[in-house]
Amino acid sequence: MNAGILRVENAAKVYRVSAGMFRGGLDLHAVSDVSFRVGEGEVLGLVGESGCGKTTMAKLILGLEALTRGNIFLEGRSVRKMGHREIARRVQPIFQDPYASLNPRKSIGAIISLPLRALGMGNRGEWDEKVREIMNLVGLPPRLRHNYPNQLSGGQRQRVAVARALIMRPRIVLCDEPTSALDVSVQAQILNLLIDMREAMGVTYILISHDLAVVEHLATSVAVMYLGRIVESGPAAEIFRHPLHPYTQTLLASVLTPDPRKGLPKVSLDAEYPNPIRMPPGCSFHPRCPRAQEICRSQRPEAREDGGRRVACHFPGPA
Ligand SMILES: Nc1ncnc2c1ncn2[C@@H]1O[C@H](COP(=O)(O)OP(=O)(O)OP(=O)(O)O)[C@@H](O)[C@H]1O
Ligand SMILES: [Mg+2]
């Protein structure tokens, strides 16, 4: 791996939330001490249950939220020192819901060309040409550029979101649940489109999903998040074949349903998902962990690195 087109160093985001009688509010630790890097052309899959901090991490990378602690470097430059435009030139997002993320009053052509216009890149003639070019590339008939989002299918709308993200040829595309609002039949088309675009344009992806099957399809490396922290990370093939953290093992086991039409079962963990306002002491996962011992209740496990893999667990190993 190279030095890393994206480097996240001890990133943390704490939200202050109002909490009834507690004057001044309480701290909600959405992201805690997260570090990872993504090399050029890689696809990093960021996975974990709802509420573990995936979207918050995405917002920190996109500069949509300010870091509480730590730092993030895009092509070696700190996001703390970059304006929105500079960040937008390097990273473009694709969000979950193409209904919510496309302005219903703008034509498809206007939506796709927005990043170029917002960043002041090129002139009207060039925008039009680039819109046609990228529409062809993502499999949208260019005549649709005069239409509006409500005249398109869900899959076409997500193609519009992909086209908008790619039009100014960013180095990184950050996909937050890019297919979870789509019909199963369309999901594969969009995933294949993302794969094709990676080959055509050499983009680096961060792919956020709670669906490990989606990540397995695309990712070259995987980071598993639990309660705001990365508990395990490494090359995708190894994580899927030999998960070492008990949380990763449970997540993987829950995906292996015999009948995919039945959807994903709930993760078979006994205790409730803990509250990020009242974090458990020691290892955050210990209340749900089948392997928990005394040390897990009192001492947070440091991430240990071994041959490109990192695991934060006192008792890592095969299930
Ligand atoms: N603006 C905010 N103010 C306060 N708390 C927030 C805010 N945004 C997120 N949170 C909290 O931070 C935690 C992480 O939320 P986040 O949206 O990052 O999770 P997620 O992993 O993306 O979940 P999902 O899979 O449901 O999208 C949650 O407990 C959430 O309630
Ligand atoms: Mg989210």
Image: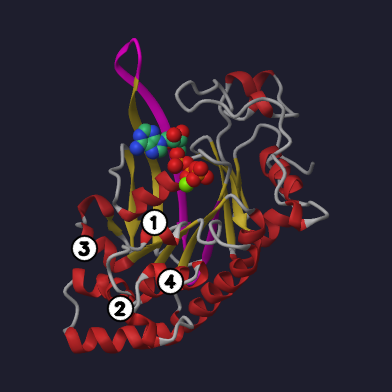
Amino acid under label 4?
Val
Is residue 30 on the magenta stretch? yes
Majority secondary structure in the magenta region: strand
Say if mark 3 contacts mark 2, CB within 8 Å: no
Q: In which quadrant of the rendered view does residue 302 lie?
A: top right
Does residue 257 show up? Answer: yes
Work out which residue is located at the far right of the displayed protein and give it. Answer: 258
User: Crowding near pointer 2: few (<14 within 10 Å), some, many (20+)?
Assistant: many
Amino acid under label 3?
Arg
Q: What is the secondary structure assignment of the residue under circle 4?
A: helix
Q: What is the secondary structure assignment of the residue under circle 2?
A: helix
Amino acid under label 2?
Gly
x 35%, y 14%: residue: 20
Which residue in the structure is indicated by mark 4? 162
Q: Is residue 309 left or right of residue 63?
A: right
Say whether disc 3 or disc 2 marks the residue closer to the N-terminus: 3
Which residue in the structure is indicated by mark 2? 109
